[in-house]
Image (spheres, rainbow, N blue to C red):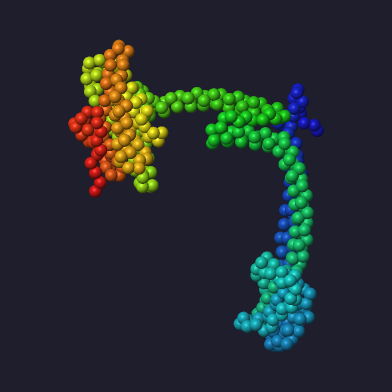
């Protein structure tokens, strides 16, 4: 029976699945053979156990008289003559008080014998017991333990047969799995890998490869189209998120980082400073006469002044430094790292000198930028963010009170 094909000649998924089911049925036959072997082991155990009980009963009849008269020598002779070659590893005769009258053990030091005896103990954990009666009166017991030779031989043969079956099943399974892999599993696995990459790694650039099965090819095409749409949406979303993230952490007028961004960087600098025992500086910068500029020339002039001052501050800082607008006419700078206090004061002096040039407005009027700067050094002037900001802010007001357009280093705040 051939598989159904569509008009293009591609096999349908239903046809492939039916063929796979037939192959799995063949594999089930091999599995059934293995189960029959296991059933044979169980049946043999039952047979050996029954045979032990039968031997025990026969032996009880033979030694009955000897047990009654306490003839231990006769009991031993009976054990030696009847148990040799009967698959018995150990036997003993006991009286009614549990006292041992006679013991017999199969003497065979070979590894096979020891292995069989061990196997017998594992499979048949209890010995076969038969009561010895004389005129319906209990006179003793016989206990027999099998040597496991028959069970061992059968198991070795069964294991050999099982290995052959397993080899045949493995060969069949390999052939079946390859066919299934090529026809169904490989395309589905490819689709699953692409889906997993898209879900967990957010990688939407992968695509499902085309396959010859009609339904799987249609599924892959639809999935690829969906990925393309998601990828385009992701690109647009990333662009929007980038803009929003920048707007959330930066000042819209000057383009500088805002207070939240500055405080986040300051927290990181504190953690690094505590861990590595390094120093950094926090600068508070306040525009002098800013209120007069707004009142005299208007807010547009004040905005132009803030933009110009922000650019001049940024131009005097190092690559590793950060300047932010805290709000209004206040700026703050994070100088990281610094070797000593003089390095921070030198940078502050450079910023003050950068304000010397006047700003020419579009109206033709000139504004003279001026900054008063307060400097706080970690850990000398504070070991946490509130202490550092407070020290820098106080130093800035001290500089402004001393002379506008100057700088001031904070007073030591450490204990």
Q: Quadrant of residue 244?
A: top left
Q: Is residue 134 visible?
A: no
Which of 35/141 is in front? Answer: 35
Tell me residue 3's x, y (percent): 77, 31
Tell me residue 132's x, y (percent): 69, 79
Q: Quadrant of residue 22?
A: top right
Q: Residue lying furthest left in this view?
A: 401
Which of 229/335 is in front? Answer: 335
Q: Quadrant of residue 273?
A: top left
Q: Residue lying furthest right in this view?
A: 1
Q: Is residue 280 visible?
A: yes
Q: Is residue 180 above or below residue 368?
A: below
Please state, as top left, top right, bottom left or bottom right, where the N terminus lies in the image: top right
Q: Is residue 220 left or right of residue 381?
A: right
Tell me residue 115's x, y (percent): 71, 69
Residue name at image x 61 percent, y 82 percent: 97
Which of 49/162 is in front? Answer: 162
Residue name at image x 66 percent, y 78 percent: 141
Q: Is residue 268 left or right of residue 133?
A: left
Residue name at image x 64 percent, y 26 percent: 221
- Count of marks, rendered view: 0
Q: Is residue 264 above or below residue 87?
A: above
Which of 57/164 is in front? Answer: 164
Q: Is residue 47 above or below residue 96?
A: above
Residue name at image x 78 percent, y 80 percent: 81
């Amino acid at each position: 029976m051939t598989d159904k094909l569509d008009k293009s000649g591609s096999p349908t998924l239903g046809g492939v699945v039916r063929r796979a089911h037939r192959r799995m049925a063949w594999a089930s036959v091999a599995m059934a053979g293995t189960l029959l072997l296991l059933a044979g082991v169980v049946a043999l155990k039952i047979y050996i156990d029954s045979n032990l009980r039968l031997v025990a009963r026969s032996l009880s009849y033979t030694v009955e008289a000897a047990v009654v008269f306490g003839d231990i020598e006769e009991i031993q002779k009976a054990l030696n003559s009847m148990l040799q070659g009967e698959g018995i590893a150990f036997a003993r005769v006991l009286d009614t008080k549990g006292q041992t009258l006679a013991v017999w053990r199969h003497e065979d030091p070979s590894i096979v014998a020891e292995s069989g005896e061990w196997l017998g103990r594992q499979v048949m954990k209890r010995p076969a017991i038969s009561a010895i009666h004389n005129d319906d009166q209990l006179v003793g017991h016989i206990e027999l333990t099998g040597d496991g030779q028959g069970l061992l031989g059968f198991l070795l043969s069964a294991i050999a047969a099982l290995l052959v079956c397993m080899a045949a099943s493995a060969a069949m399974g390999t052939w079946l799995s390859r066919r299934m892999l090529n026809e169904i599993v490989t395309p589905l696995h490819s689709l699953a890998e692409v889906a997993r990459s898209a879900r967990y790694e957010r990688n939407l650039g992968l695509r499902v490869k085309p396959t010859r099965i009609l339904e799987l090819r249609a599924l892959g095409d639809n999935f690829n189209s969906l990925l393309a749409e998601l990828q385009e949406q992701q690109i647009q979303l990333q662009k929007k998120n980038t803009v929003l993230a920048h707007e959330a952490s930066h000042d819209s007028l000057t383009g500088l980082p805002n207070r939240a961004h500055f405080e986040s960087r300051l927290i990181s600098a504190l953690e690094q400073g505590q861990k590595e025992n390094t120093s950094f500086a926090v600068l508070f910068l306040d525009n002098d006469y800013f209120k007069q500029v707004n009142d005299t020339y208007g807010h547009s002039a004040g905005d132009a002044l803030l933009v110009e001052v922000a650019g001049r501050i940024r131009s005097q800082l190092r690559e590793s430094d950060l300047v932010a607008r805290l709000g209004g006419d206040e700026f703050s700078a994070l100088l990281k790292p610094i070797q000593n206090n003089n390095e921070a004061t030198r940078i502050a002096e450079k910023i003050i000198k950068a304000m010397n040039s006047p700003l020419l407005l579009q109206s033709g009027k000139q504004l003279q930028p001026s900054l008063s700067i307060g400097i706080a050094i970690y850990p000398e002037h504070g070991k946490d963010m509130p202490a550092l900001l407070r020290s820098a802010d106080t130093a800035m007001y001290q500089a402004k009170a001393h002379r506008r357009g100057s700088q001031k280093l904070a007073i030591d705040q450490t204990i």
